Image (spheres, grey):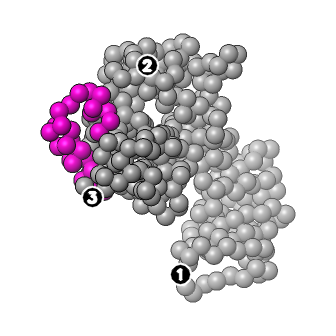
Amino acid sequence: MIEFKDIQIKYGDYVAIDRLHLHIQPGEFFTFLGPSGCGKTTTLRALAGFITPSQGSILVNKKEITHLPVEKRKIGIVFQSYALFPTMNVYDNIAFGLKLQKKSRAETDQKIKEVVQKIGLNESHFTRNVAELSGGQQQRVALARAIVLEPDILCLDEPLSNLDAKMRIGLRSELKRLQRELGITTLYVTHDQEEALTLSDRIAVFKKGRIEQIGTPYEIYNRSATEFVCDFIGDMNRLDQNILQAINQQTGSSLNPSREGYIRLERASLHQLSDADVALNGKIVDREYHGMYIKYTLNVDGSLIKCIEKNDGDVYFEAGETHRLYLNSRDIMQF
């Protein structure tokens, strides 16, 4: 469906994107993930036509669009700021693109009524000025304005970043539902790892203008290809030489003590989960209560290791207690 072939994007001598190769399948929810300034929005804007690559080609359905004008690409985009027209009401904002296409009033009315039902708005919002709407409602209006044009591709540039945490979580599921119903190929830009993992069919992790890894959420999280991906996706424990040597002695594993080891918080436990687990003695130095789970921090031979325990309402360890921490060498990643 979408192909980026040897894409380079430069600003003067600065190379923002270097030799990007990427293929996105039809109907896929594909996410560009990475820290600020890594090139993910630049790549999205090149696809939409706002930036022209200094070299390489962008193809959609095997047709090159690298130099095609924005309005001819059939790509809808929702910006982080929503980019709504503050002097227009909701109806006129959604209808803006249809009016540019010179659609009849009857066809415009029909399309707008169909799309607002899908995104959780209703006709009572039509006459309201967008400045009167909540952040979540403005986000829906921006989304409606994009999809009412029936684009082949939908680009979402951090559309939830301006919303509070509870609203973000609610709108995530709505976005995914809508994308599945429409069957539209969607590219999503975010720096939020949880958003990427919950929404995506596949993820590309960016670092300094290059892609570090492409994979499903499961692959990115459990089979990180590089140290950067491993450290960027979710919380990690770093295991030093002493701990790795202790694990090797107990299990006969061949972990390399000269390199740091990584293990995710939920793979460390205060309870033995299998006979293959390694037991390390530690002292609980901190705990954080999160409702559904409790995060403990243990001092193990001078290293601070965190683990997550399900909050079952019964077991509640105190700071200062000495306890065994259990790890499985198979869960340790090294690079």
View extreme (right): residue: 302
- Residue extending farthest left: 106
Picture layout, residue 123 above or below residue 49? below
Provide the secondary structure element on which disc 1 rests: loop
Q: Can you tell which of label 1 and label 2 is closer to the viewer? A: 2
Question: Is residue 116 inside the magenta stretch?
Answer: yes
**Which image quarter holds the C terminus?**
top right
* Disc 3 residue type (three-letter): Ser
Q: Tell me the CA gap for discs 1 and 3.
A: 45 Å
Q: Position of residue 171 (x, y in %)?
A: 41, 56
The residue shown at (56%, 68%) is 274
Circle 1 residue: 312
- What residue did someone put label 2 on? 58
Check if mark 1's residue and mark 2's residue have beta carbons within 8 Å.
no
Question: Is residue 262 visible from the viewing direction of this image?
Answer: yes
Q: CA distance from mark 1 to mark 2?
A: 52 Å
Location of the N terminus (image quadrant)? top left
Is 316 situated left or right of 286 in this image?
A: left
Residues in magenta, as a range: 94-122
Is 233 magenta? The answer is no
Which residue is nearer to you in this view: 214 or 222? 214
Left or right of 311? Residue 257 is right
